[in-house]
Amino acid sequence: MLSIETFVIVSVIKIVIALFVLLTAVAYTVWLERKVVGHIQNRWGPTRVGPFGLLQPLADGIKFLFKEDLTPPHVYKPLYIAAPMIALVCALTSISVIPVGNWVTVAGVHTPLQITDLNIGLLLILGITSMGVYGVALAGWSSNNKYSLLGGLRASAQMVSYEVSLGLSLVGVLIVAGSFSLRDIVEAQGGHFWGFIPKWNIFYGGQIVAFFIYLISAYAETNRVPFDLPEAESELVAGYHTEYSAMKFAMFFMAEYANMITVACVASLLFLGGWHGPVFGPPILQALLPIFWFVLRVFAFLFIYIWVRGTLPRFRYDQLMAFGWKVLLPLAIANLVITALVVTLRS
Amino acid sequence: MVPLSYYLILSGILFACGVTGFLIKRNIITIFLSIELMLNGANLSFVAFAAQWHALSGQVFVFFVMVVAAAEAAVGLAIIIAVFRTRETLNVDRVNLLKL
Amino acid sequence: MIHLILFLIFGAICVAGAVNLLAQRHPINSALSLVVVMGSLAGEYLLLGAEFVAAIQVIIYAGAIMVLFVFVIMLLNAGAEEDTGGSRVALLFGVPGMLIGTVLMAWVLLERSGTQAVSMGALPGPPKTIGWLLFHDFLLPFEVTSVLVLIAIMGAVVLASHPESVQQRNKES
């Protein structure tokens, strides 16, 4: 066991690294989206700023910093300023329980590649997602603008509705794994069956339906196509972030992409086997290869996110809500009942 | 090591704030919020005594209190919306007559 | 020592939030103060070891029930509270009565409560044991609350739906 001082120093280092990596990942997810959607639409995407447009996020960041931060006159100032901060804080906090690899020994300190391994880790992520709804709702209301209010109400009602099926789809995984701790869930997916097929929760745990329910609910939770009516440009001006400019808008933007990355990480951990993959070579490679496999899965999930964005039209709001309550919720409950039956009969 | 009476005093203070809000506030939604505050104070008492007597049923009962609070909030807010539609006001002093 | 410091910090935030709920005039500020109270109560539950209850407090109470309150406040948009006097009996007797009652209760609890001190994380409440209790010893209340929630859903849908008179008024205008 580490002493208190070592624990604090190691935790601070992990937090700094995780935040840095997450913010860089957010910036380059934006770049990836612009390139991929551009290629789907038969055009290039950013190409001028740096090779392949790779410095475009840097240029965007500088632009956001220097833009005029306009505050409209009749907004409710305290909440107007606090809402993007709430959204960003909730989006960034979930990274604290996400494990990216095994235990490693760095400079004599034996530590997991995770900021903290709570035994209710999954509940923490669900709780933070629930609190993120406030950022959207308060932004819409405090802007003193009917389009913002409508967009904010619709977006928060959509997020609250799809949180239910999101949570229920995860309960199937919990029944199979038997623990709320994300590290335990990943470690239960080690090994192979029938020789070569890995024991991921999609295959061996039988959670394929739950995976698709989670995928669809995640698209609705993060307000992405095909469920992005509340913030689409052609619908409600820009929905709940109409009246925001410069740094506050950048905070909403970052919060949306950070949510996407968090959801992709959770899906990789719970359904796709986490960091399991072929590991070989010297100890340094054995520590880094699980991270590489994890990042590969997250990247695949993000690519599917962006692919769907470039391909599908968007749902109308009543179709969206009807789908969430009348189709996804019964499916998630049925998945839960069947999983519980199978697990009981197997043991 | 914190004496249990500290937790109970905190629970009592929250409950007292809830009752005071219920008595002095005139906006019906704020009155409703005070009721929720009272329920939270009671929840803290439950968990504190569960820790004292090592009985997990205290923590399980908090569940039921939360479910009842959720059901009551849903129905109460629906009533508030219905009252607002007819009376156009949220002030309890203006809805104290049966005739409009 | 650290248990006492953490308890006092969370307790101070709780009481500050509760007093702010009373002091604010606009209901949205009161609702957000209540969210702060619920968050710090989750911290208190963690200090007592009730980890599952703390998580459920944040997810359900602060993250769903209070969102419902905030929705209704935003939808109705009735503005800050106006001063219509209110009940003088309640003000004259209620508020001092509550103050005196609270002080009396605090004194009695400090002197003669007959309870002992609890340590940090006194009774761990992992989800597994709570689930076991919920589905074995408390199965009947669990099923009854599910019926209660169903009744609440039906009641809310019926009460909040548009009455016929509004539709007729709209047709005439």
Image (cartoon, coloured by chain):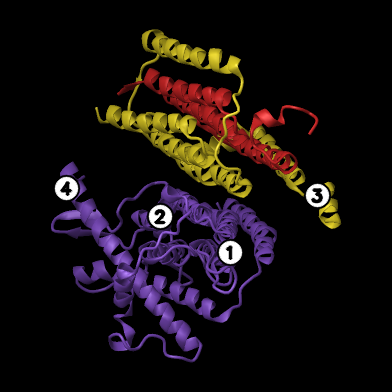
Q: What residue is disc 4 on? A: A6
Q: What residue is disc 2 on? A: A182
Q: Kindly indicate which chain is depicted in purple in the rendered structure.
A: A
Q: What residue is disc 1 on? A: A213
Disc 3 secondary structure class: helix
Mark 1 falls within which chain?
Answer: A
Choose mark 3 or mark 1, whichever is in front.
Answer: 3
Q: Is residue A178 visible?
A: no
Q: Amino acid at mark 1?
A: Ile
Question: In this rendering, do the residues under marks 2 and 3 share a single chain?
Answer: no
Q: Colour of chain C?
A: yellow
Task: Classify mark 4: residues with Cα within 10 Å, few (<14), some (14-19) or many (20+).
Answer: few
Q: CA distance from mark 1 to mark 2?
A: 19 Å
Q: Amino acid at mark 2?
A: Leu
Q: CA distance from mark 2 to mark 3?
A: 52 Å
Q: Is residue A347 left or right of residue A34?
A: right
